[in-house]
Image (spheres, rainbow, N blue to C red):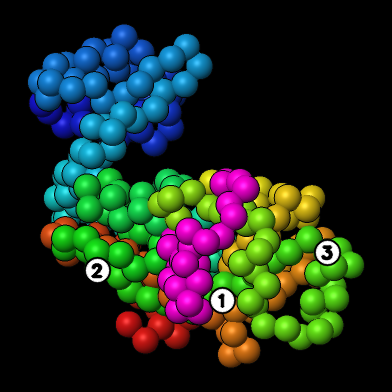
Amino acid sequence: MNLKQLEAFVKIANNNSFSQTAKELYLTQPTVSAYINKLERDLGVRLFARTTKEVELTDEGRQIYLDARKILELTYKIEHMFSKDEDEEMQQIVISASTIPGTYLLPGILANFNRKYPKTEFRINETDSSGVVQDIAEHKADLGFAGTITGGKNITFIPFYEDELVVVTPNTGRYREIVESKKGLGWITGEPWIMREGGSGTLKETFRLLEDMGIAPEELKTVARFSNTGTILMAVKEGIGIAAVSRLAAAVPVERGEVLCFPFHEEGAYRPLSMVINGLYPQNESTGNLIRFVKEMYGSRA
């Protein structure tokens, strides 16, 4: 294993292309392929899943990506330690994000961060909250954004945003009458429910809220499960059932009159959205800057 092989590996992972990597490194494509084949033989694993149309990291490839990138960053730092050339190299942050923080908060965070730190590139892995914790635990990402706090060895959660969960229903006469009557939420047990998938932070927090209300989740009639909050809101709009979602996600459909929104409590039912880090691995400078930036942006208590 050598630096040229690692450089080719990281560049292919970044641009998902052997041919583009060959151009960037001023090499022939067969040479780049030979580097990767040799690296895979040395490690005894496949690093890329190759098809005629695309190249993607395997789980083993994702597992070594951050360490390979760090080796190259340290090499660059040593090579330029005494250089008078002040041109900064592009820094990269690999982020694993669950649906709600990833869809409704992360784009704004990264846009504002990039204005302050323009020499930053982001790689985003979209998953659920359980997937985020797994990515951080396995050192497949520098930083995670998750919708629930769970256990995990060496995993630290840094809450930064209080997200309200609400119940959304179709905008029909029956549900509008419930809004006008200002009833409690006792009626939800008899309704058809649309749920998120098992690893979802929203699902786990919904179950916790229901149990606090004395409602066992198994009492509910689940008619559909989706992995995407946007699809759930469309299903609610079409009348399939009701659902618990983030107010962040419900805001636009409610404003458009597509669905109705009910709070769990008068004072609201909140769950923390958190950044996730692995205590075994120190953050690089760019990741540390992003963590501090998010804390300042949201006035985090952490």
Whole-percent x, y for residue 263 in the image: 64, 79
What residue is at 21 percent from the left and 38 percent from the top?
Answer: 64
Left or right of residue 284: residue 173? right
Nearer to us: label 2 or label 1: 1
Instruction: Please name the residue that numbered disc 1 is placed on.
Output: 164
Whole-percent x, y for residue 282 in the image: 17, 62
Label 3 residue SS:
loop
- In this picture, which residue range is highlighted in magenta? 201-226
Res 120 seen here: no
Three-letter residue code for mark 2: Thr
Instruction: Please name the residue that numbered disc 2 is placed on.
Output: 156
In front of the other: 9 or 41: 41
Three-letter residue code for mark 3: Asn
Nearer to us: label 3 or label 2: 3
Give the spatial CA distance, label 1 vs label 3. 20 Å
Q: Please identify the quadrant where the N terminus is shown.
A: top left
Q: Earlier in the sequence, mark 1 or mark 3?
A: 1
Would you call the spot at circle 1 few (<14 residues within 10 Å), some (14-19), or many (20 or more)? some
Q: Earlier in the sequence, mark 3 or mark 2?
A: 2
Label 2 residue SS:
strand
| Numbered label attached to residue 171 | 3
- Which image quadrant is residue 18 in? top left
Whole-percent x, y for residue 136 in the image: 27, 54
